[in-house]
Amino acid sequence: MSLILKAVENIPLIEKGDDIADIICKNAPDIADKDVIVIASTIVSKSLGLTFREEDVVPSAEAKRIAALNGKDPRFVQAILDESVEVFTEAPFMLVRNKNGHVCINAGIDASNVGNGLLLKLPDNPDKHAAAIGKSIEQKTGKKISVIITDTNGRAFKEGQTNVAVGLYNIKAIRQWIGEKDLYGMVLEISEEAVVDEIAGAANLVMGEGGGGVPAVIVSGLDLYVDETVSVTEMYRSKERDVLIRGLLELKNEKKEK
Amino acid sequence: MSLILKAVENIPLIEKGDDIADIICKNAPDIADKDVIVIASTIVSKSLGLTFREEDVVPSAEAKRIAALNGKDPRFVQAILDESVEVFTEAPFMLVRNKNGHVCINAGIDASNVGNGLLLKLPDNPDKHAAAIGKSIEQKTGKKISVIITDTNGRAFKEGQTNVAVGLYNIKAIRQWIGEKDLYGMVLEISEEAVVDEIAGAANLVMGEGGGGVPAVIVSGLDLYVDETVSVTEMYRSKERDVLIRGLLELKNEKKEK
């Protein structure tokens, strides 16, 4: 088995209203059945016009309280709060669950590769946008494809960031190995592979972060296409099952009591 | 830019004393300069004879105490404690820092793909074994290559496992983008890409978990080869910098006080 990842070269700087599917198809003419199209959320957000100016945000008392703890601008903190349903850490950084259920730093609000001093936020329902782009690519190419929208994230216990999936179309987040047999015929009991995050991370090796970076990658050679409704939220661990989240909330409560 | 991952097919079931480098070279004759050879720690541990029987482990009082909390066999808990320098959670699962600094469930002790009812532990110094295998492959092929030894891990906040790097040769864990400019000429401030974990995860898409799985993958097309001493421990976040670890220890202390 082999797997091939190709950068979609020559994608222009994306503006509000640009047709991402059209731009990808024009620059990647050899899309095939079962290909996975990996797209950086940055360009999806830009096409949706999700940029904003920090100075236009009015900070609440809560935002000012948190900003005093973490040294960020209170308006930046307010923008994070506006995109979050729960805050797990306030300082030294804000780890939150965003409106889509994704646990990340700063609710995914970023200034890299945005330009003009603007900030950019993640799309509200990334699965919906993955599906819209995916269906449009399928119409234009006549091929059955999957889409993964990605964002750069830090990791637990380790330095360095990677790309993860934040929106899906025609690909399930998790590949089930449970019940299959291992090399010695023993039945696997706990094996669920996070395939979409593995693909997102792999695509990041081709995307790069800097000015030479590309925001879309075509992945060929996988057999993970599914013709059904999928959601990235299926892999978000519930609070009840998440011992890390419980630990962070304990730490937060203890700090408040001090 | 494009990236190609190829499974090394026909690797036999590995026994103690087997020469991993020799087996990979015989089954992957077209290794090229700068290729990254990704190897599952399972076969490295097997070649080192790191299997053991649960019934041969004598549990301490501490192991019995933890086993009463998490429902595991006290001998299995003792085996985990023997491989760990710190325990962050005791139940419902044991999240520990292993002797090499790697934070993982059960100290990486596993029964999948081992056979004969045996358990398998991770090598003590995976960088050393990555270097030994890598140098041997370089001698046999005359090519300059990198090696990543991997293990399957769970993730924070998300269901599903992925492959991560646990040992390195001739490749740095983190790719620095800090100081480079973004698409709009703005200098990137926080961008450090966890390339070895991205490669490990990508290779997992080709390896698979079940009986049809392959334990080695050749990755071509990257420009990450470095001819210097490297260590996977460079990406392990120190306890002082790790708010998640602090949260887990708070949770553990609170439980003890109850």
Image (tube, coloured by chain):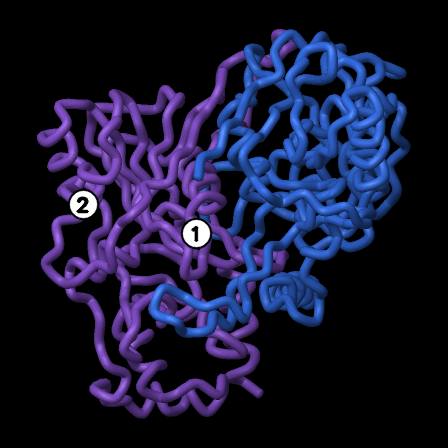
Chain colours: A purple, B blue
Nearer to us: label 2 or label 1 = 2
**Horizontal relation, residue B74 to residue A227: left or right:** right
What is the C-alpha distance between the residues marked 2 and 1? 42 Å
- Tell me if residue A233 can be seen: no
Name the amino acid type tagged 2. Ile
In front here: B88 or A143?
Answer: A143
Q: Position of residue B159 (x, y in %)?
A: 45, 41
- Tell me if residue A67 can be seen: yes
Task: Mark 2 or mark 1: name the one nearer the start of the chain.
Answer: 2
Chain letter behind tag 1: A
Please name the residue shown 24% across and 31% down the image: A170
In front here: A154 or A237?
Answer: A154
Q: Quadrant of residue B216?
A: top right
Please name the residue shown 20% across and 27% down the image: A228
Residue topped by disc 1: A240
The N terminus of chain B appears in which quarter of the rendering?
top left
**Horizontal relation, residue B90 to residue A196: left or right:** right
Residue topped by disc 2: A23
- At label 2, counting other C-alpha atoms closer than 10 Å, the crowd grade (few under 14, some 14-19, many 20 or more) is some
Instruction: Tell me, for residue B75, which label it has, or none.
Output: none
